[in-house]
Amino acid sequence: MKRLHLHISTGDLQTSKQFYSAIFGQEPTLERPDYIRWEVEDPNVHLAISRQEARGFGIDHVGIKTDTDEELGDLARRLAMIEAPVRDEPQAECCYAHSDKHWTRDPSGVVWEMFHTMAEAKTYGTDPGAEFIKEEAVQLRRSSGCC
């Protein structure tokens, strides 16, 4: 099964926690001082919020969380078929998880993360693949001539 992933950067983690806990009708699945995550069945979503002020506030990226390597591989093959820009990030440690990932961006520059998580991690970690794709997205937006 795949689940829609959203990552939102916020300046007020506790108020955001209250908001999303009320919407989903459940407490977070994982909570750290700088990061909170829900895995919800209805709607089927994997929502993370974090305090990453350097990135700005709001939607950081969207994605798809897979349950298996096969599902992740299928997504990568679909992206390859349309020659989408992809940055592979195997054995990543980010967001308190150990995951295999593929990063891409849509034609409008929206950053997408496809990932399969194998285990929890003790630290937030980093996402060099995300930063690479985000920089490309910024360049794309600047060259589009819009707004």
Image (cartoon, helix red, strand yellow):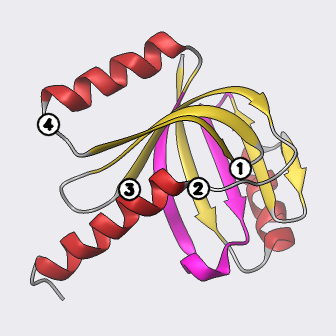
Apparent side of residue 86 relative to residue 5 in the rendered image (left or right): left
Disc 1 is placed on an element classified as: loop
**Among the two numbered marks 3 and 2 on one chain, the one whose residue lies closer to the N terminus:** 2
Q: Amino acid at mark 4?
A: Glu
Residue picked out by circle 2? 7
Q: Is residue 28 above or below residue 117?
A: below
Q: For mark 3, what is the residue?
A: 111
Vertical relation: 128 (above or below) 28: below
Question: Residue 15: image x %, image y %?
Answer: 82, 72
Residue 68, located in which quarter of the rendered image? top right
Q: How many marks?
A: 4
Q: Nearer the viewer, mark 3 or mark 4?
A: 4
Q: Which residue is mark 1?
A: 95
Q: CA distance from mark 3 to mark 1?
A: 16 Å
At horizontal 78% and vertical 45% (from top left) the residue drawn is 96
* Label 3: how many Cα within 10 Å (few below 14, some 14–19, many 20+): many
Residue 10 in the image, given as x and y percentages of width and height: 68, 73
- Which quadrant is the C terminus positioned in? bottom left
- Location of the N terminus (image quadrant): top right
Find numbered disc 2 in the image and state the secondary structure of the residue it sits on: strand
**Sequence-first disc among 4 and 1:** 4
Confirm whether the magenta stretch covers residue 43. yes
In the image, which residues are magenta?
41-65
Q: CA distance from mark 2 to mark 4?
A: 25 Å
Q: Are marks 2 and 4 in contact (CB under 8 Å)?
A: no
Residue at figure coordinates x 14%, y 26% from the top left = 81
Q: Which residue is mark 4?
A: 83
Residue 97 place in picture, x, y as percent: 73, 39
Q: Nearer the viewer, mark 2 or mark 4?
A: 4
